[in-house]
Image (spheres, rainbow, N blue to C red):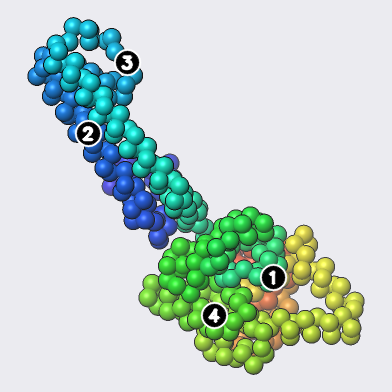
Amino acid sequence: MNLIQKIRKVLKWESSPKPDITLNAELYAQLLPFRTPLILIQLCMVFGTIGYMQIEGHSLINAIFQTGYTITTVGFGSLGEGEFSPLGKLFTVTLIIFGYTVFIFAMGVIIDVINKGELKRILKERKMLYRIARLKKHFVICYHNEYAIEVTKQLRQNHIPFIVIDPREDIEAIAVEHKYPYYIKAKPHTEEAMLKAHLSSAKGLITLSDSIADNIALIASVRLFEKEHHIPSAYYIISASESVEDISKLKKLGADTVVSPSKLTAQRITAMAARPDMENLLEQFLYKSDTPLDMEEVYVPKTSWMVLKKLKETHLRDIANVSIIGITKKDGKFMPMPKGDVLIMSESKLLVIGTQKGILYTKGLVKKQEKPEELKYV
């Protein structure tokens, strides 16, 4: 390890993350037309320098200086141009005309590239990709529609980072209107779009297309992306389906959760009609971001000290001020309101209710391999 690396390690300096696609090739292609003017300017400088050294006997530095302010037409007087020989004056006029021609040509190239607008677009997209590369545990939302608008509102309120991908041309205007901080113009199912969205660091993906074909293609592409790029943990994929019959198809293809808007609407209306008080409670508790309580599933790893312990022996209520209101076993069976004598099995999920601070503390306790010190005082 060299000195610079040691200093960076001591000061905890981290290199700025780079996107999987940097658009460098596209950027270089746009800058390629500038190559000819730059070469002509260099040739003009070499030609002028040699000419003044041979004709007027200038030193190398004076010849470079004379050539520089001659081809840029900034004026004369520094090196006594009034004493030039006739050949020197003729050479100077020729050099001025050549330099002015190169300048006009260069301005034409610059104006042409800028007017096309492609360079500006690439620079803006490149800046966005570098911003996206800093994200971790974000969600990738595919296709902009009414569902995406509502989902992104909730994600913003809960401070969950997200990226919106949509192929339409006006996605930038849409992003500004609906306050999407990160967006990409691309077809979501392509590998290029997934690389631009920094999917390797994402937590999951939400596909909200009205077309079942789009959702199928996207789910298959994401699962293939996992295998090809050796992603250690599977992405959590949420899909929408207008048809209840398509829910099983999407789940078989790899979707973790499939939401049917029509089914959800019917369930909410039924709940409001049958138990309006319970619906108001859910509205206050689950759907508002400023509620002090939260509910989350906590995974129990094989190495956890809680494995094969009775629920009452964990003393989570006393230590973390949370309650276990359900346990999902490894086989997927759900046990509501478990009693204190229930054994906690490995690879199960505890449905925890409490404050966000308490739930976070509970996650840390569950991950420990040794019995925590806090239990000594309970």
Q: CA distance from mark 2 to mark 3?
A: 20 Å
Inter-mark Cα distance, 3 to 1: 64 Å
Amino acid identity at mark 3: Gly
| CB under 8 Å between discs 2 and 3 | no
Of callouts 4 and 3, the N-terminal one: 3
Report whether 45 appears left or right of 365: left
Mark 2 = which residue? 42
Badge 3 crowding class, 10 Å Cα cut-off, few under 14, some 14 to 19, many 20 or more, is few
Point out residue 137 in the picture as x, y percentages from the top left corner: 54, 64
Residue in front for this viewpoint, 122 or 4: 122
Residue 327 x %, y % = 66, 82
The numbered dot on residue 214 is 4
- State the residue lying farthest toward the left: 54
Which one is in front, 73 or 308?
A: 73
- The image quadrant of residue 245 is bottom right
Amino acid type of the residue tagged 4 in the rendering: Asp
- Disc 1 to disc 2, C-alpha distance: 56 Å
Q: Which residue is the site of mark 1?
A: 146
Label 1 SS? helix
In this rendering, the label closer to the viewer, 4 or 3: 3
In the picture of the structure, the residue carrying the numbered disc 3 is 75
Q: Relative to residue 52, is residue 187 depicted above or below? A: below
Q: Is residue 310 visible?
A: no
User: Marks 1 and 4, how far apart in space?
Assistant: 17 Å
Name the N-terminal-most of marks 1 and 2: 2
Q: Amino acid at mark 2?
A: Gln
Mark positioned earlier in the residue sequence (3 or 1): 3
In the rendered image, residue 54, in percent from the top left (x then y), is placed at 9, 19
Q: Is residue 222 left or right of residue 104?
A: right
Front tag of 2 and 3: 3
